[in-house]
Structure formats: structure tokens, C-alpha cells
Amino acid sequence: LLEAGDQTVVGDRGTPLSAGQKARISLARAVYQDADIYLLDDPLSAVDAGVSRHLFEQCIRQALHEKITILVTHQLQYLKDASQILILKDGKIMKKGTFAEFPKPGVDFEDILLKTNEEAEPSRVPDSPTLRGQPSESSVQPQESPRPSLEDAAPEDQDTETIQVTLSLESRSEGKVDFKAYKDYFTAGAHWNIIILLILVNIAAQVSYVLQDWWLSSWANEQSTLYATAHGKGKEILVPDPGWYFTPYSVLTAGTVLFGISRSLLMFYFLVNSSQTLHKQMLESVLRAPVLFFDRHPTGRILNRFSKDTGHMDDLLPQIIQDFVQTFLLVMGVVGIMVVVIPWTTILLIPLGIIFFVLRRYFLETSRDVKRLECATRSPVFSHLASSLQGRWTIRAFKAQQRFQELFDAHQDLHSEAWFLFLTTSRWFALCLDAICAIFVIVVAFASLFLAETLNVGQVGLVLSLALTFTVMVPRCVRQSAEAETMMISVERVTKYLDLEKEAPWEYKHRPPPSWPQQGDIDFSNVSFRYSSDGPLVLKDLIPLIDLRKKVGIVGRTGAGKSSLVSALFRLSRPKGEIWIDEIWTATIGLHDLRKKMTVVPQEPVLFIGTMRKNLDPFNEHTDEELWNALEECHPSRDSSEVCGWIWRPHNFLPVILVPEGMSALIPYTLTLHSSTCEAFILLNRDNYFIFSDLKHCTSHISFKF
């Protein structure tokens, strides 16, 4: 049943467990609490009749026989085993008592029981063919007897219902950041022509900055010569025109400012555009990914890419790269001038460069892996927070707040440890660089004193000024280069989502006619289906034929393959074999053209954040009258005005905004309202194919009219 036993990893919303497995695990979790009172909100509806009877006999009647157990259910076959029964209608208690007390005049209990049994045990109608397939999540199994024996229930079911998808651990790269990440990042921002222009602007800005200092040094040397000549004897003094030095210096200063502003604007525009492009490509890749991707990757792991990693690309990485480029060019200019003015500084610069290179490489060997570890430990924090918010009612019901808080603290502590380790390694690296540069400045300063007789005033001032600049810029340049490579890990993680496996194309060049399908027959030709390329076959060589305008019931035990057949129809994964709809092979048309012709009500109906109107009519194709007619027809009550009252009034219902849980706080949160809304959507679209994943969850009367 579970390959790893109780160590099986369960993801968001119970992925990869089936609905039946979720129900049994939830029931087992409640039993393990050893409470005095148990409130069971219809846990038996998610499994078939045999497993349901097994759970009722072995768990509710035996394991909980000494406990107070309140079971909410619509399966009336279990009422005779209850010590007390409450019948509710429209929120009121109609009758209460024992099973023997109900068959009395004035109580329509027998009619209700008979009607429910007729719905639970469908008759064999010749015009309604039945498909039998192989795994899925829930089903209604036809039984020869309304109470199957225990031997026919759980054991066989447990052998057939296996997990089709397993959660994978988040992968982590090792070693250097792949060159592909750099290429994807820089080429995403602009064309190569813009990149070359950006390089030239940066070089021009640095050249103008160096020439400005060099010209100022020449000006200072000339003024020193004039001062010495003025105090000499027998020499003629020639005073040059001040404009000869001032005008070029002003031009160089203006050029430095102009090129500096230009390169900063171009650099930030280029890098931010790269981040936006990669984000769009990642979003498109995730949207085009098959459903299997979302089953194998928890929500927190995906959110980590779209939040923190994208935030690094938006905020930190452009600033770090801009700072690194400027400081690198500045260091190159400083080194060049120092070598030209005082050639012997080369003796110091060569070993200094080797030391910096070795130290940087040593630091990156650690910082890269620490950064990857920090990114990987952040995902469980997001996943745990998201799952805790989704299951907060269950957490409170079991009084497990402290346990979940401790688990969150453990995830957060692990991430904080990795983050603190990254900060300490960065500080150690900065301290080493500052110490080495301080030693270098001391050596240059004393060397200038020893060579005072061979150097003029301008050269000494220039060398000392550049040495001080060197001590500030070189550590900064090396740190930023290491930080840039570390932050490129976020780009590396994002680019991994650019190469996800994609679904089939949404649209092909040759599209089916707008009137397709006209007949509506479906033909399966040796169809086999698996959820992943390395997973087991869940459908094997199906060859059923569904005639036009037929209502088909797909029945089978839990894990028989009913929902897998629906997945094959929608091509959630690529099936083997051929599925023909109205003489068109579905593999030859785009997914949009295929899926828009079919509408499904899933086992767990889904409503999106937004108004009720947007959920019913997202493309504004229907009038208010059509929306109200669909809602009234799908509402389970015969008299919706009695039950819902103000809820269904046009002026206060259609504009109501639905919250993330699915329903507005002003509206009672019920599965009935979920299903009714989805069924109203079906009525409005009038598609050719309607698929109900599980009629037990389709509570409105319209579900049985389709």
C-alpha cells in the first residue's frame, strides 16, 4: 500500500495519496488520539462500499466501541447499528430516537431510506453502458448484496491501491555554477549588440576616470616646477595659460559623470530586464508543466523559486554585479597607473593577486554549498507554513498547535543555521581581505619614503592616493565577485525550471472545425496510461466504445482506475494507444481544443479567489438572468428561497468575493455550495461532454439529470 510504510512523505493537500487513503489515514489519526468523544464527518464516503463496511465494522464498532462516537453520514445502511439517530432537514432536527422507533406513522424515514438505497445501488439499464477499468481515488461499486462480507473488502483493496506518484527530495547542485546559468541570465536581458555597447560604455567611463586623475597629477607637477623655478636663480619663469589644464580637466570630469550615469542606468535596465524575462519564462514553463510536476513538487518549493530566488534576481544581483563591474574596472585602472608610475610595485602586485585568487577560490568552495543549503532549507519553511494554514482547523481540533509550532521552529532553525553560516563565512572572507590590503598599504607608504629622492611630489601623492583606493576597492571587488557567483545560485535554481517537461502543445496549426464534435462518440483503441514514464501502468489496453449521447457510468473498486480514465481523456499525461472523439484522434489536436469541449466536476470541487460571477462566467459571456437560472437549477433544495434566503438575491451574491478557502465568510462553507457552483458552470457552458469524478460528492439534484 505504502512503499515506505509510515515514513512515506505526504505533500501539500495529501499528495500523492488518493482520496480513500486520505480518509483512512485521517480516521486512523483520530483513533490514535484515544479521545473520549469522536466526531466523524462522513469519512466513509471517500471509499467504496466494501472498504466502507470494513472500516465501520473494524474501526467504528470495535476500536471505538467504548467511546462516544458521533457519525455524520448519508449512508443509511449503518443506522441500525447506532444507539441513537438524529434526522436533520433544513438545519432542524426532524426526529430523534433509535432505529426501531422510526418506522412509525408520520415519519417518512422509510421513504428516505428506500430512495437513498435506490440511488446507492443503480439498476442495470441497457442504454447506460458501464466501463470497468483499473487505479483511482473513489468509486461506487455495484454489489450483489448491500452488505458485502469483510473477506471481499479491505485486503484485496489494499493490494490494488498503490501510490502512483512519490514526492522527490529537492535536488541540490554541487561545485561551480554552470556556465549555462550565466549565459541564460545575461542573454535574457538584451541582444549581444546591447551587451557589447554596455561593455564599451563601462570601459569609456573607467578610461575617463583614470585620465582625469592622470591629468590632475600632471597639472600638480607643472605647478611644482613653476614654484621651484620662481625661487631659483638666473632662470626665466614661463607661466602657462590656466585654461590649458582647466579645460581638458573639465571635459574629462564631465565625461566621467556622463559615462558613469549612463553605464549605471544601462546596467540596471539590462539586469532587471534579465530578471523579468527569466521570471516570465519560468512562469510559462511551470504553467505548461504536466500535472505530475505539481504532485511531485510541494507548493513551498515552487513558491521558493518565485519569491526568494526571484527576489534575489530583482534586488540583490543587479546591485552586486553593477558594483563588481565598477570596482573591477577601477582596480584595473589603479593597478595600471601604479605600475606605470612606480614599476617596482609589480613585485608586490603579482603575489598579492595570487593570494587574492587562492583565497577567493577557497572561500567559494564553501560559500556556494552553504548558499545552496540555505536555499534548500528555506523550502520546508514555506511548505510547512502553507500546509499549516490549509489544515489549521484540523490542527486546532487535535490541539496540535504546540507540535506544529515546534516543527516550524525546527525548520526555521535549520534555515537560520545555514543563513548564519553563510554570513559568518562572508565576514571571515572580508576580514582576511582587509588585513592583506592593510599590509599592502603599509609597504607602499614606507617604500614611498625610501624612494622620496627619485619621485616627485605628484607621483608620491598619486601613488598614496591610489594605494588607499586600492585597499578599499580590491577587497570590495573580490567580495562582490564572490557574492555575485553565490547569488547566481538563485539564477541556477530558476533556470532549472525553464527546462521542465512540457505538456503537448496547447494548439496545433491544423485545428478541428468549430462545430466539432457533432456526434460525440468516444473510441478507445488499446489505451494504456501511466502517470509518469517510470511509473506502473494504471490502465492497460482499454478498448471500450462510448456511443453518442450516452450516459456512461464508470464503476470499480477503490484503485480500479476510474479517475485515471478521466485523466487519459484530458491527456493529463500522454497515454499509449489511441483515443478517438468523433473520428478525430485526440493526439493530433491541441490541448485547448480538446479540453474546452469537456467539463469535469472533480471529487473536490475547486473555486478560485474572486467574485462568484467570475467563477461562473470568467469570460463575461452570459447575462445575469442566465447565471441565476443556472444557480437556481443546480441548488439542491427544491425551494432555494426557503433555504438560502438572502444568499441568492442578485444584489448581494454575484459580487461576493470568495476567499482562499473557497467561500466568502458571509456564506456557509459547504461542499454542497461548491458542487452546485461547479455544476452551474457546466450548465452555462453546455459542453459536449460532462464528467463527474464522483457522484457521491455531487449533492445537487441536477447531477442526476445530466
Image (tube, rainbow, N blue to C red):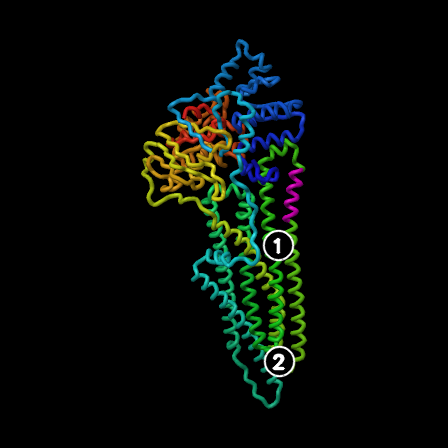
Q: Which mark is residue 24?
A: none
Magenta-tinted stretch: 403-415
Q: Mark 2 points at which residue?
A: 455
**Structural crowding at the residue carrying mark 1, measured as other residues with C-alpha within 10 Å and reported as few (<14), some (14–19) or many (≥20):** many
Q: In which quarter of the image is the C terminus?
A: top left
Question: Magenta stretch: dominant SS?
Answer: helix
Eyeballing the image, is 241 above or below 485? Answer: below
- Amino acid type at mark 2: Leu
* Residue 405 covered by magenta stretch: yes
Q: How far apart are marks 2 and 1 (CA)?
A: 48 Å
Q: Which mark is residue 370?
A: 1
Number of numbered labels in the structure image:
2
Residue 271 spot, x, y in % from top left: 50, 57
Secondary element at image label 1: helix
Q: Looking at the image, which is closer to me, 281 or 518? A: 518
- Quick one: SS at disc 2? loop
| Residue depicted at 56% across the width and 20% down the height | 78
Residue 577 in sight: yes
Task: Indicate which label's residue lies in the foreground, 2 or 1.
Answer: 1
Q: Check the image and report above or below for 144 versus 567.
A: above
* Residue 660 sits inside the magenta stretch: no
Give the percent coordinates (x, y) of residue 253.
Answer: 52, 69
Which residue of the protein is positioned furthest toward the bottom in this rendering?
Answer: 234
Image position, residue 268 (x, y; %): 50, 58
Work out whether residue 465 can be spotted: no
Given the image, on which type of amino acid does mark 1 rest? Val
Q: In which quarter of the image is the N terminus?
A: top right
Is label 2 in contact with label 1 (beta carbons under 8 Å)? no
Neighbours of disc 2 within 10 Å: few (<14), some (14-19), many (20+): some
